[in-house]
Image (cartoon, grey):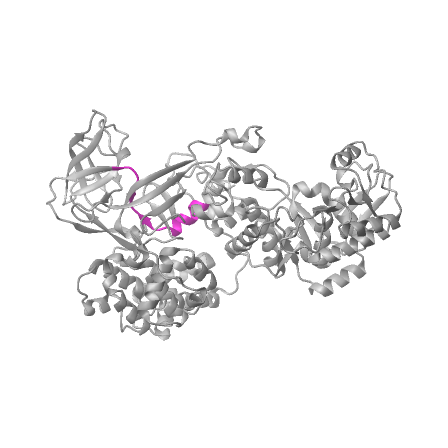
Amino acid sequence: MGTGGDGDKPGPALPLEALLALGLDQRTAENALVNNKVTANLAAVIAEAGIKECDKSVGNLLYAVATKYPTNALVHRPVLISYILSTKIKNPAQLDAALSFLTNTGPDSLDVGKFEEACGVGVVVSIEEIKSTVADVLEENMEAIKEQRYHINVGMLCGLVRKRHPWGDAKAIKEEIDKRLVEILGPKTEADNIKPVKKKKEKPAKVEEKKVAVATAAPPTEEELNPYTIFPQPEENFKVHTEIFYSDGNIWRAHNTKEILEKHLKATGGKVMTRFPPEPNGYLHIGHAKAMFIDFGLAKERNGHCYLRFDDTNPEAEKKEYIDHIQEIVHWMGWEPYKVTYTSDYFQALYEHAVELIWKGLAYVDHQTAEEIKEYREKKMNSPWRDRSIEESLKLFEDMRRGLIVEGAATLRMKQDMQNENKNMSDLIAYRIKFTPHPHAGDKWCIYPSYDYAHCMVDSLENITHSLCTLEFDIRRPSYYWLLVALGLYQPYVWEYSRLNISNTVMSKRKLNRLVTEKWVDGWDDPRLLTLAGLRRRGVSSTAINSFIRGIGITRSDNSLIRVDRLEYHIREELNKTAPRIMVVLRPLKVVITNLEEGKVLDLDGKMWPDASDTDASSHYKVPFSRTVYIEKTDFRLKDSKDYYGLAPGKSVMLRYAFPIKCTDVIYGDSPDDVVEIRAEYDPLKTSKLKGVLHWVSEPAPGVEPLKVEVRLFEKLFMSENPAELEDWLGDLNPHSKEVIKDAYAVPSLATAVLGDKFQFERLGYFAVDTDSTPEKLVFNRTVTLRDSFGKAGPK
């Protein structure tokens, strides 16, 4: 197993700079270095090439050689590398053809003439030829283009051009088609941005049946076309945000004055400014994906900026591991922060504003314990120290800052309204004493601001136009604006949206942390979790997650539980288009083809794509068919039935891409129910027409065991739809949420799979290469099954 012989043993360490010198982008280079197999292969390829730097196009081809080269033809790898360095092979299409040719050649002597012919060496396709052929193809399809506009299948158009110029530059072809489409159709309209809805095939109506009125679907609303239209423009932020009602009848109407708003707009240039403010105390989950979609998405749609701001006010909870993860996963989700900031960057300014609050008589140093504060809030009673003098509070706050007061003996509280019905106006704590060094700010501070104090203040300091958060923060809106009004600071527009709740899982960080630390799951990236790291490891793409988020919308009206089937629908929709098909047998049952001569191996073609042309070699993979094949144990029964399409004694089935076989004998083990082997005959003329079609894997050579892979099957982590509501939520864990199949059999071509590759295992589901894969054995995670219970009704 493995993509190259060098990948089966540790190779020399490669510095990041060596890979960047090959023209690889930063992310590709970093990902390569965390995979020992890829690193070893890259080191070998670079050594064989004898270079230290090269053009990006050459470097990308060398990287592909390192990750895809067949192990059976290593002797010819230096030859292929020389063709790349001399630019005789200069694009991915040529390289794929070369790799296919070398896979079939193996260690045998290389026929240079046939090799060059197979991969288009010497064939030059000029830009003029590409432009001419693109023009011809577009003209031939003009009727469909004008009808479908930007919904036309561009991949299909590229394919038509590639059929005429198989060695043409694929990127140049795509760019020319895109350019010509804009010239033909003009700029995209709103209608062009709507994803077309697939129409179900309707059965033809019988003549005698009466005509039935067909209800037409309502046109999409403006909000469905663009979910961000609900948000006001920055220059509109002069209206009253919130009325802050006091228990004495007084009302503060929070809004920006003309002068404050003009100063803000001058600082931002009138741009939309948002922020994504995670606390670095755990890994991000799919709920954060919704927050990112709203925060980054609004800024992107309005041509503005979005900060990635770490809310690091608690020095005891933050870890560098979490900070690094969050930055990496934000990029993986497709978002680019305007700046990466930390609440701790503003500690000095926050401290100075706290002093200002004390001077204004709007904050005081308190000595109540946490229990006393809770009791006094419930009784709506003022603290005994609420009315101490400004001078005394100033001195005590300075003592707190200098570390002269012990931890827990004093806090700084905002003087809001202890008799207010809204508990978030009950003199919230602004500062606590913590003698803990800060991961980002060091040991400068021993007092740390609370979330309630810092959050709104930093929003204002960063000139955030839209402060977006989930609905549970709705009751905190008065205290948010109270502080900004008290200090005369710019006030962002606050809007709350419904949080994302998905069935059969938990998403509170406290519960997730417990699952991880108590070893109920295998880390933050366990594929059963709906953490973004877990989803990625399972094989889910960021585009599928964002498609799911867009589909459920960003309104504040719905806080219901979303069935996990809905997420799986979007995952399946994408993988159906992007994951090549391949055959793997999970629980092998041996079948001996008795009428196929000993030692004979037929090389058959399997289709990577259902609609692949028989003449398109790049869309096929080689499937050996020999005397010993393996089918799924579940595809054989001793008793046949009308509704059963598998194999049974005396019955025939079709082996996919191969031949019909008929069961002629059954070999038993120690009991009548223990079937250990099937004897069968194949029909080389394919005269039988059969309903049952089975996937299978064969010995690649007589007596040689098929490629062994490990397959992990995942089910829902919890048995109940809403385990978070259960008192004993851990008792609801599904004991069958993970099944590991150590010795599944796969076709030989799967041996070249690397981390990031995804496949549809025919009849089984969609699978992705796991990070636990080694040069000795590949490991695959089931991303999602082929079954689609949600999609039958379509996304709602």
What is the span of residues highlighted in magenta in the rendered image? 571-588
Res. 128 in view: yes
Placement of 73 over or under 508, stated as above or below: below
- Let me know if residue 579 is in the magenta part: yes
- Image quadrant in which you'd find residue 343: bottom right
Q: Nearer the viewer, residue 328 or 716?
A: 328
| Horizontal arrangement in the rendering, residue 686 relative to residue 732 (left or right) | left
Q: Number of marks in the image?
A: 0
* Residue 232 in sight from this viewpoint: no
Nearest the viewer among 266 and 331 is 331
Q: Is residue 312 left or right of residue 26?
A: right
Query: Between 211 and 734, which is closer to the camera in this rendering?
Result: 734
Q: Position of residue 514 (x, y in %)?
A: 55, 37
Image quarter for residue 248? Answer: top right
- In the picture, measured across the screen, residue 191 lies left or right of residue 644, that is right
- For the point 31% across and 64% down, which residue is it? 95
Asked if residue 619 is among those painted magenta in the image, a careful observer would answer no
Residue drawn at (38%, 59%) of the image = 39
